[in-house]
Amino acid sequence: MWRWLWPSGRQALAGFWRDRLAKLSALLTVVCIAAAFVFSNGRQFLMPGPLTSAHSTIENCVVCHTASGSNKLTWIHGLVADNPLADSKACLTCHKMPATAFFPHGASASVLIESTKRLSKIAALTPEPLSARMQTSAFPSREIVSRGLFCSTCHREHRGASVDLSKISNEQCRSCHVLKFNSFDRDHPQFEAYPFVRRTRIIYDHAAHFDKHFPDVAKKDPTRRIPAACSTCHENREDKRIMGVASFEKTCSGCHLNQIMGKERASGPKGIAFLALPGLDLQTLKKKNVAIGEWPDASEAELTPFMKIIIGRNKKSSALIKAVGKLSLQDLSNASDDQIAAVKDLAWEIKRLFYTLITEKSSEIFGHLNISGRKLSADVVANLTASIPRDVVLGAQQQWLPNLAREITIGPIAADQRSSSNTQEQAPSNETAPEEPSADPVPEESAEPAERAEEAKTANKNKAKRDPPACLMRVLGQCLMASGPENQDQSAQPADDDSERAAAAGEKKSSDVKLQPPMHAGLKGVGGVLELAENKPVNQSDELLSPTAEELREINARNKGTRRRGQTDTPAGSRATSQTTSSSPQESDASMASDGDPEAWAEYGGWYRQDYTIFYRPTGHKDKFVHAWLLLTGPQAPKGDKSPPAEVFDALTSKDAQGSCTKCHSVDDALGKGRFVNFSPLSLENKSGRFTKFSHEPHLTTVGTQGCLTCHSLEKTSAYQKSYEQGNPTKFVSNFAAVKKEVCQSCHKTDAARQDCSTCHKYHVNNAMTPISNAKIPMR
């Protein structure tokens, strides 16, 4: 019996020691683990594998694993399934991503829906390989994708320092896509209008330049530089992704710089009309007894759209611009009384504008333009005005409106009263009756300045003897200030008296022709109505607006040559009335005269004055004046709009516009909110949202002698230029044929160049943003 029990006893003994050993091993394991937890500095020993080099500095697991806790035992919490997106949100503390980060490809839902519809149509025509069907059955991913993708779905950590976390296999891509295929050279769909998704920002017709412009230029001037290769104009950018266009100076300036500066302009002014004294129907205004003060009757200028914006910078003035918007200012015969009143207010607003431009800072006017809804910065104001010198406006005022300071001081009401007084003193209207000699005769043009001054002085004295003291200021019919005998010679005449300006051209000292500022209740002209203010002297002798005799002679000399060429603002022999125009300054042979054309003088750009208009001539490419006005008015200028901002934008972007910006820079509509000119070149930011990536640099050495034409074939019959007549950049006809799949497949195929999905496609269509440090400067 013991013989039969012995084997079982031996087995029992073996089992006993085996159990003892297992328990001892378990106890030893627990002790070792406990010792590891107690004596270790961190929890790196718990990691399933080493981190990649990019994450190797992370020492605390809770940085990435939000459920693991901060002490050595809370890692047990991570064993329980939790929200899979929690750890992905921790990734975004360093990797800045858009709000759609957990959508597939980081794209918006609308983009994904459209892409899925397009690929589903292609998938219906493409046979699905067996390997793809097996993968879909074993690892269904549709349900996972619908709940959102977290970072670790594609980026698997703890696989070693040399692993590329951004690398995604073809199988990973294929597991989600409705369109499934094995490789690029097998079943990959054909390209659709690749790589063109919108028209080019620069309007450049390659076919027209190759076949017409370049040969014509070479025949006319063989020394002119003609591009010999694509690389003459195109260069690889620093980002290696974009084949950009070289600078204007390297490419287009040889032919187009003179067009920008107006040297090749065949007709019309070479400058942009900025400020003007528009021509008015003075006869109709005179018949209706509308007093606008002095105004030249020879002006045929138009009210510029820039002035409409500047004058209409408040609600009241903006309504005034609208009221006269449909009127022809040079023909008011059919205008209503309300329209005539609006024209009168406009005339005074123009005068106040010139007065303010001379006496105030430009920022007070241009800094509050009613376009952007906010005060403009100093740099923007400088660009909008092209730093126009005050002397340019001052010179125009002294020739066009020499008594502007006095008129602005007394205001429109006093001008109305003076006009009524002058009308009552006139003889009855009879075309056959002889005209009575004027009390203030204007000397003949042939008379010498000294003789004219003496005659005017004598006439003033005679009038002072027979006339009572003149009223200098009237409000509501009441005279506030009358001139006495001691200053009768200087202030008794009306503001636009011809004899006073004749005396000013004589040999008197400059102090003799200045108006003395009378002391009375201060008057402020606001919207055509004078208001009483605190007692203060009214400065009627502003040296900027009331030139001395010497200054008048200099101004006259500067314009002498212009009058000889028939370009004067007031032609010789034209007499100004007390209501409309003032006699021009007297000439002096002692001053220098110039026969130069003002427009030709501004050959290289800048400001000049001609024909009652102040023009600005572009200085060259990237002119800041044109650029600033286009950027300011474009967002407020929808196509077809008739507002002043739209008028400025249309004037600067028309086919014959000075500067010719839109000859090359395309104009896009901004979804009905306005328009903008494509001044910014193509960049990686412009390519955001695309699934496809391509780098020109590694391909430039493989294209052979054909170069760029290997992939880009010119379409000479395409309606390229016509597609720019409308504002939608996505509706276009390319100057080149689309790149075919066969072109890429000639190299990217099995046993040749790589053809995995990530070669041409990127997962995150909107790249991660670089975080910015918020470290503060240390201060003592």
Image (spheres, rainbow, N blue to C red):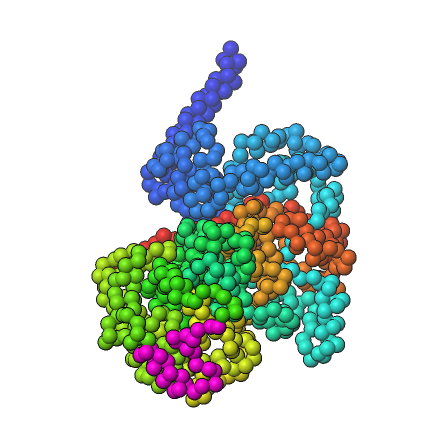
Q: Give the residues drawn in magenta, as a range.
A: 434-462
Where in the figure is residue 315, as x and y percent of width and height? 41, 50
Closer-to-camera residue (393/660): 393
Above or below 459: residue 372: above
Tell whether position 504 is magenta.
no
Instruction: Say which quarter of the image contains residue 137.
Output: top right
Above or below 710: residue 586: below
Q: Residue at x 42, y 59 (%)?
A: 349
Q: Would residue 479 appear left or right of 398 to someone viewing this image?
A: left
Closer-to-camera residue (710/486): 486
Where in the figure is residue 728, as x and y percent of width and height? 62, 49
Closer-to-camera residue (566/778): 566
Q: Residue at x 70, y 49 (%)?
A: 193
Above or below 537: residue 733: above
Q: Would residue 724 appear left or right of 460 to someone viewing this image?
A: right
Residue 415 shows up from this direction: no
Quarter in which the C terminus is drawn:
bottom left
Q: Would residue 81 appear left or right of 676 to someone viewing this image?
A: left
Tell whether position 447 is magenta.
yes
Where in the figure is residue 561, as x and y percent of width and height? 52, 82
Q: Residue at x 53, y 83 (%)?
A: 595
